[in-house]
Image (cartoon, rainbow, N blue to C red):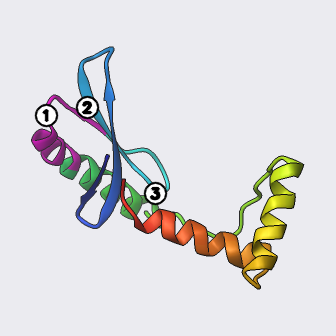
Amino acid sequence: MNMNINGFDAVISYDPEIDMFRGEFVGINGGADFYASTVDDLRKEGEPSLKAFLEMCAEDGVEPRKQFSGKFNLRVPPVLHQRLATQAAAHGKSINAWIVELLSECATHHH
């Protein structure tokens, strides 16, 4: 589950060991986790956690949001590589262009 708090995305998971929800901000330079027993309380806990993180960044002169280069390596089995090449060619695209299109579709449909 995802939650947006003051323009920052957080991923929410359930921690059975402590019987609480855990929120973790993603795409930031550092950690700002927060815990609560209900989903409603997560937002209440997340806001001060985010605020403290942003204040710390301001003091240290750090950019709070991670800068993404837009490049990452992906290792796939050779058989899959072959299939991707075939499919991309069938769509008249490079493997890169075709995969970017597929990933864009997946990333915009929230499950």
Q: State the extent of the magenta-drawn residues as a range.
A: 34-46
Q: Quadrant of residue 91?
A: bottom right
Instruction: Say which amino acid is labelled 3.
Output: Ile
**In the figure, is residue 77 to the left or right of 63?**
right
Q: Quadrant of residue 7?
A: bottom left
Mark closer to the chain start, 2 or 3: 2
> Label 1 belongs to which residue?
38
Secondary structure under badge 1?
Answer: loop
- Is residue 70 among the parts visible in the rendering? no
User: Where in the figure is residue 98, as x and y percent of width and height?
Assistant: 69, 75
Instruction: Say which amino acid is labelled 1.
Output: Thr
**Residue shown at the point (72%, 62%) measured from the top left:** 72
Is most of the magenta stretch helix, strand or loop? helix
Labelled pair 1, 2 in contact (Cβ < 8 Å)? yes
**Residue shown at the point (53%, 71%) measured from the top left:** 104
**Residue shown at the point (52%, 63%) measured from the top left:** 66
Q: Nearer the viewer, residue 52 or 21?
A: 21
Mark closer to the chain start, 1 or 2: 2
**Residue shown at the point (80%, 51%) measured from the top left:** 75
Mark closer to the chain start, 3 or 1: 3
Instruction: Say which amino acid is labelled 2.
Output: Phe
Q: Nearer the viewer, residue 37 or 109?
A: 109
Neighbor class of circle 2 (other Cα within 10 Å; few <14, some 14-19, many 20+) is some
Neighbor class of circle 1 (other Cα within 10 Å; few <14, some 14-19, many 20+) is few
> Label 3 belongs to which residue?
28
**In the figure, is residue 39 to the left or right of 59?**
left
Secondary structure under badge 2?
Answer: strand
Q: Nearer the viewer, residue 63 or 69?
A: 69
Q: Which mark is residue 21?
A: 2
